[in-house]
Structure formats: C-alpha cells, structure tokens
Image: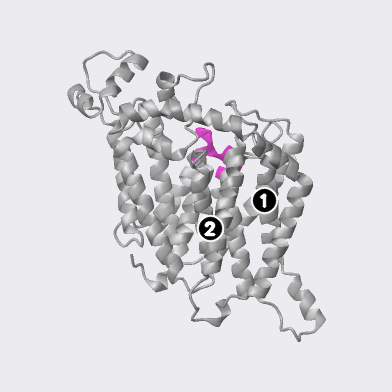
Amino acid sequence: MLAWTVFAFGGVYPATLVVPATICILLALAYRPSLVARSPTRRADFWALLVAGAMLLQMIPLPRVLLHTIDPAAEAVARTMFLVDGGGPLPISIDYASTAGALLLFASLLLFFATARDILAQGGVRTVTRIIAVIGLVLSAIAIAQSATGHGLMYWHWKPASEGPEPFGPFVNRNHFGTWGIMAIPLLAGYLTAHAAAHYGPDSRAAWRERVVAAIDTRAWMLIASTTTLIVALALSLSRSALLGLAGALGCGALLAMQGPPAPHDRRYAPRSGRAGALIAVLAALAVLGVATQVGPGAIARRFGGSGTAMADRLAIWHDTLPVLRDFWPTGTGAGTYLTSMAVYQRSKPGVIFNQAHNHYLQVAAEGGVLLALPVFLALAAFTRSAADRLRNDRSGIYWIRAGAAAGLVGVAVQSVWETGLTIPANAALAAVLAAIVISVPARAGAQS
C-alpha cells in the first residue's frame, strides 16, 4: 500500500486509489483492528472518531433556520455559488462532494492506522522499516534522475494536471515529495542506530578477517544508501518548507537520542555508542558530500534568499483566509472545501486560485471551525501523550526506530506551518504507519492505555 500510493503519483488522482483502498479493506477484514475498546490509544481513537463524526455532521442537510443560527454565512455563500433558492434544507458544507471525499479518505486512513498498529503489535517493525528504506531508495533515485532529464514531466511522460511547482519524482509537487522524505529520513536513521546497537561487531582483539566481514554489513549499507539519497533528493528539490521540516525532525531526533531509552533488561539492546556513532557519522558525511556535489550550498542559499517573495505570497493567502475563519468559525465551510471557499473569498492575485492555505492548521480551522478543529486538537494531544509514554517506557531496541518515527512526525508538524503535505494520500499513509510504529504495544506487553 505504501509503495503503490507513492509511485502512483502520490495518490492525488482518485483512479489510482482503487488498489490501496482494496488493500486497506482486505487488511482490515483479515486483522479486524480495534478502535477505542481494547485500544492502546483509546483516548486518541475516541477523538479521531469524533473528527469523522464532525465531518459527517457537516454533510447533513439542516433546516435553513437552524443553519442560519449556527452558521450565518453558509446560506449566503451557497446562494452566491450555486444559486440555491430560499427553501429547502442545506448542509453546513459548501461543497458536499469535496467533504464526502475528505471523510472517505480520513476514515480509510484511520482504519489503516488501526490495522497497522495491531499488525505491528505482533512484530515486524524492522521489516516494515526495511520496506520503507527500499521504497525511499527507488523513489529518490527516480526523483534525482527525473530532475536532471525529465523536463517537468512525471516519469518522463506525464504532465501534471494542475499548475504549480514542477513535479519531483512521482509527486506532482516538490513540497509533497519533501513531506515523504521528512518522515522517512529520521525513521531510517533510527533503524540504523537500532541495528548498530544489536549488531555491534567483533571484539577489538578479533582477527582482521572478522573485521572485514563485520564491515560488509549489507543491511547497514542499504539503510545508509537509502537515507543518503533521500537527503540529497530532498535538498535537490529546493523545497524550503521540506528543509525546515527536516531540520525540525533531526533536532527532535537528536533530543530523543540524547535522552536515550531506559536501561534495558536485555544487554543485547544496550546502546553501543561507538558503532552507532560511527555509522551515523558515515551517513552524515555521505549526505553532506552528496548535497554539496549534487546541489551546492549556493543553490540552497539562493533559494532561502528568495524567501521574502514566498512569504509575501503566503501572507496574501493567509489574509484571504481570515474572513473565512470569521464567517464560519463555529462549523467551518466543510472538510476539503478550501478551494471552493476561495471562489468567493479570494481577493488577492486575480487570475490565480488558491487551492490550499499553505498552513495545515489554518486550513483545518477554516474548513472545520470549532466543530472540527477542537476534536482534531484533542486527538493530537491524546496521541502525543501516549507517544511520550511509549518512548519513556520502551527498553527494547525498537526505541530507536520509535524515536525516528516520532521525529519524522514532528518534522511534518513543523513543515505544516507552510504546507499541507499530509493531504496527499501517499504522505498520509506513511504518517499513519509512523504513528502506528510510535504507539504500538507488543502483544506480550499487553494493550494498556
């Protein structure tokens, strides 16, 4: 499912989602994941279900008197856009089809998260991470090659349906590629650390042949190759938001690494700082060398040097979004309706339509109002608390992978100040898997809240 959504244009075209939707349904039928009851994150699950309920409520037609009471601007916008009469009931959402699509996607991802959480509780965290490493290696290789020779075409053949930044790899937008990279890079670095902790090589007195064999560690070198090429590709995309998000992810990862796991019961998982540090140093050196040769510090500096214009554009978008917040603060315009609302509220940049708020938090507030934003905030708060508990109590080698997954999610939270990358199905699916890695409880440990 992760591979399909990535390589099928990030999943932005509805026709490409048939396969992952089928996989999601089959996995759910096979594993029958639990939500709320017997769930290790029952509080987060409860609020997430309320988010889905709020989206559903936005789609229910309401009597005009009630709608005018709770959402005074909804009828006026509907009359402006759709020329509705003054009679029958209207839903809160100003674009029923878009809200239905957003609800279907959110419900599917919630089910996918719950299924992944239950699967990973049985084991397989390392296996899934290795799969992500292979996907990342292929993805970044395609992106680097396409950037040099693709001439703005995805897979050297297809032109994106929407205008905007040039595509990067199979993603129609380089910022969306950056979102995937922000999550994958710290996850793979965490697995590299965990691998070094569990396979710390021969004793210092071992023969040179044993040292050579230990150095030829295919798994470690695969992780280093995948992480390095992802970093180079992300830098080559010149996505400012992605680079800032990656900085946030690496900063969070460094803090979690300094904190380290509690003292393990099993000495096999005791941190071997020498080998782990050496492998991370090799990774960092290769990444710096790759970025310097393929991108160059000058290109990155020039990119950030032009941030003033980009910031002015975002301020214009945010300025045009504020009236939506003012008019629809109780219930929002409907999940997935930001583009539709701009047909009425956009005032700046005539000839260009704003299809996203370039701030995920602002977009959630505009589309959902208090009705949607409040349970979203409470779900995130409950998940964060549970994630902190898992990290604090994990004594196994999985700690480092769990910490990498958490750092990736923090990095995306930083990027979301400027982008809405998690609206892309491929990125949302990876985020669901990372969340499952962070929160999963081994079956032998029980499912305690």
Question: In the image, is 389 to the left or to the right of 128?
Answer: left
Taking the magenta stretch, the answer to whether it contains residue 79 is no
Identity of the residue furthest to the left in this view: 65
Task: Give neighbour class at mark 2: few <14, some 14-19, many 20+ (Cα, 10 Å).
Answer: many
Badge 1 amino acid:
Ile
Q: Residue at x 59, y 50 (%)?
A: 246
Percent position (x, y) of residue 290? 75, 51
SS type, badge 1: helix
**Which quadrant of the structure image shows residue 121?**
bottom left
SS type, badge 2: helix
Q: Nearer the viewer, residue 303 or 358?
A: 303
> How many labels sit on residues?
2
Disc marking residue 252: 2
Q: Residue at x 43, y 71 (%)?
A: 393
Question: In the image, is 115 to the left or to the right of 126?
Answer: left
**Which quadrant of the structure image shows residue 64?**
top left
Question: In the image, is 6 to the left or to the right of 90?
Answer: right
Taking the magenta stretch, the answer to whether it contains residue 15 is yes
State whether residue 427 is above or below residue 382: above
Q: For the magenta stretch, what is the residue range?
A: 5-18
Badge 2 amino acid:
Cys
Q: Which residue is mark 1?
A: 231
Percent position (x, y) of residue 322? 39, 29
Identity of the residue furthest to the right in this view: 208
Q: Are marks 2 and 1 in contact (CB under 8 Å)?
A: no
Percent position (x, y) of residue 408? 53, 54
Task: Give neighbour class at mark 1: few <14, some 14-19, many 20+ (Cα, 10 Å).
Answer: many
Percent position (x, y) of residue 309? 60, 29
Residue 413 seen by the camera = yes
